[in-house]
Amino acid sequence: MNAHPFLRGGKGFTLIEVVISAALMSLILVAAYMCLSAGLSSQKLIEPRAEIMQNARVAMGILTADLRAACPLSKDNQFLGMRRLLGDKDADNLDFATHNFTPSHPREGDFCEESIYLDADPETGQLSLWRRRNPTIAPDPLSGGSKEEIAKALVGVRFEYFDGLDWYDSWGELKPGKKETSQKSQPNLSGIPEAVRITLLFDSNPKSKAVADSGERVLEPPFVFQTVARVNLTGSSQGGASYSSSNAGGSDSSAAPGTQGGGTF
């Protein structure tokens, strides 16, 4: 009587071979799943950060372009930079005029009143950077016009001002003439600064839903973006007299901001 072909030829798989093959297949599947999971996690981590960098690039471009063409806002308040806080967050604001404006309606020129400030979204509570623009000369240069959102999901904004010698946390005063100080002792009380250092702090992961035991969201360290915008029209707007002392202190004002160490964030 002939034996069965599988028993005679030895063409089947033994139990040990099946177990080893299943184990190897399991290792391959687990490794593939881990690679796929790591790729998806990296994508979730990179996408919001890429969006933050793009928002920061756009906001910095808008601010530097407007500040490079800054000019006196009004006779009483030429340039105002006020130190401000929203809760425990830095929320400085700027008020100035700029020639970086293209008129689109009658009675408009290249002069535009402008404000830069932070405001919170009432629904989400996130801070956004806003720009108010008024291309018509108004009795109150600090109001009117229309506003637009130029960056979302910030956790702070800081402006510092350079007079040719030193950096200051604020610039100008809302009601001049009240203080018994001279411009020589406090040159940041009037006129226009030679440069403005801009520091924007963005939420590093605004879409994160991680919460602490207390129920509050766990904030990661913010992304900090910083640049220095030189005010190109400073010399012509000062009339030559008010900033003669600061111009004498340094002939190259464009190089000075990068060499000063005061007031960095």
Image: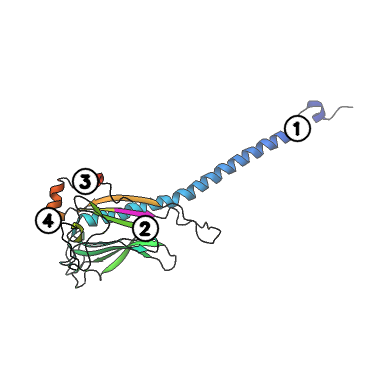
Q: Earlier in the sequence, mark 3 or mark 1?
A: 1
Name the chief secondary structure element in magenta. strand
Tell me how far mark 3 sits from mark 4, CA to CA.
19 Å
Using the rendered view, name the quadrant where residue 182 is placed.
bottom left
The disc label shown at residue 156, or none: 2
User: Going by the image, does 218 lie left or right of 257?
Assistant: right
Foreground mark, 1 or 4, reads 4
Q: Position of residue 107 (x, y in %)?
A: 16, 69
Q: Earlier in the sequence, mark 2 or mark 1?
A: 1
Q: Label 2: few (<14), some or many (≥20) within 10 Å?
A: many
The disc label shown at residue 102, or none: none
Foreground mark, 3 or 2, reads 3
The residue where tag 1 is placed is 16
Q: Assign a secondary structure to mark 1.
A: helix
Q: Earlier in the sequence, mark 3 or mark 2?
A: 2
Q: Is residue 251 above or below residue 139?
A: above
- Which amino acid, mark 1? Ile
The residue where tag 3 is placed is 256
Foreground mark, 3 or 4, reads 3
Q: Say whether residue 203 is magenta.
A: yes
Q: Label 3: few (<14), some or many (≥20) within 10 Å?
A: some
The front one of 121 and 101 is 121
Tell me how far mark 4 sits from mark 2, CA to CA.
32 Å
- Which amino acid, mark 4? Ser
Q: Position of residue 219 (x, y in %)?
A: 47, 55
**Is the Cβ of the residue at disc 2 closer than 8 Å to that at disc 1?**
no
Check the picture and name the quadrant holding the N terminus.
top right
**Is the Cβ of the residue at disc 3 closer than 8 Å to that at disc 4?**
no
Q: Assign a secondary structure to mark 4.
A: helix
Q: Position of residue 80 (x, y in %)?
A: 23, 62
**Is the Cβ of the residue at disc 1 closer than 8 Å to that at disc 4?**
no
- In magenta, the rendered stretch is 198-204
